Image: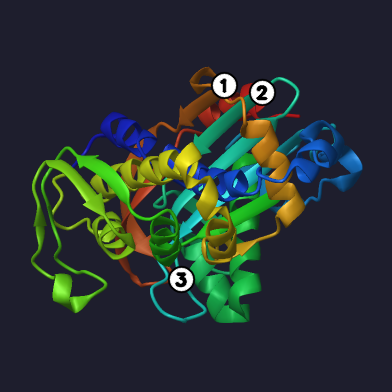
Amino acid sequence: MATTGQTDRKKGKAVKWLLTVVGVIAALGVAGAYYYHTLTPQQHFVAGNIPVVSKPTVAAVTTAATAGVTTSASLPAASKDRVFNVLLLGSDEQTTNIASRTDSIMLVHVDIDTQTYNILSIPRDTRINLPGYGETKITHASYMGGLAGGPAAAMKSTLDAVSNLTGVAINYFAETDYRGLQGMVDAVGGVEVTIPYRIALTYPWYSADKGKVFNPGTYFLNGQMATEIVHERYSLQNGDFGRQQTQEIVLKAILKKAMNPANIANLPQLIAAAHSFLINTNMSTEDMLSLAIGLKGLKAGDIHYYQLTGHSLYAMDPIVQTNLYYFVPDMQQLNTIIAQHFAN
């Protein structure tokens, strides 16, 4: 089993993948000169236009205080111009079921004026107190919310769980799944990826692909095969962490292909396909276009990643009624990260 330090480092490999999804979608709309001039982020993301979809509750602060945990839940909601928090989610949904779990959870703090993007990766196994259920995994928030009230309740449950854990308000959210990847890859005409490890498809989406092997090397993939390799985890030495690395590799390849000048002729097709990239979001087309303009000059040094430290725990889960593995975050470290890099 990986140590906490190893887990945090490996989780860091997945930090980019959901941000890249939003970046790809946003980049597709930058072609319109009209939008470029009228939807600059300096004009678009002003306090009066920035929604607040979730903020910490008093109950969460009280519960944490009772447990002897110092929280950051007293931080104010976002109110400054051009500063906001985006929650990026990756769902494990594979059917039309209304209940699914979140495989990837990332909180992004955006400051347009300083061109700063701070990203906090939250492990799916993070132990939280889910109202009505007790101490369980944060990934269960979406599932239980979906069972109780459908997709809208699933999203609200996840938003509240993250907001209560971190103590910050959330302004926007964007959720994707693996089917969105297939649409993106096909829309750009396939991608070239370099895989650094062996991938054997054990539980593929398409039965005909079972048993196919990708040895380390460079491959040109269509949407179906890209979807298959980012779904695989059981054959990888690092399991879920290896899968997250594969997701990063594929999504970076999609972004590179979409931004290639040779793909300009495909922009109408790319824009049409953008609707299939996300399962759920409160970001309007204008929001995405404005964010794309803001990302245009983004440099590697503008993005800062933060990983949680903590310890492992095996305990009875009130939802599945069996002992499960949990990641218990160091709340003092979390509060320091939030206060220094996510407070508005």
Q: Mark 3 or mark 1: name the one nearer the start of the chain.
A: 3
Circles 2, 1 touching at the beta carbon (< 8 Å): yes
Give the image location of residue 297, x and y in percent.
61, 25
Side of 292 relative to 259 (left or right): right
Residue under label 2: 115
Which amino acid type corresponds to the residue marked 1 in the rendered image? Answer: Asp
Tell me the residue that label 3 is attached to.
Answer: 100
Look at the image and tell me in which quarter the C terminus lies. Answer: top right
Please name the residue that numbered disc 1 is placed on: 302
Q: Residue at horizontal 21%, vertical 69%? A: 204
Mark in front: 2 vs 3:
2
In this rendered view, identify the residue nearer to me: 295 or 115.
Answer: 295
**Label located before the other in sequence (2 or 1):** 2
- Distance of mark 2 from mark 1, alpha carbons? 6 Å
For residue 169, say whether it is visible: no
Q: Which mark is residue 39?
A: none
Q: Amino acid at mark 2?
A: Gln
Tell me where residue 227 appears, x and y as whole percent: 31, 61
Residue 78 location (% of width, % of height):
79, 38
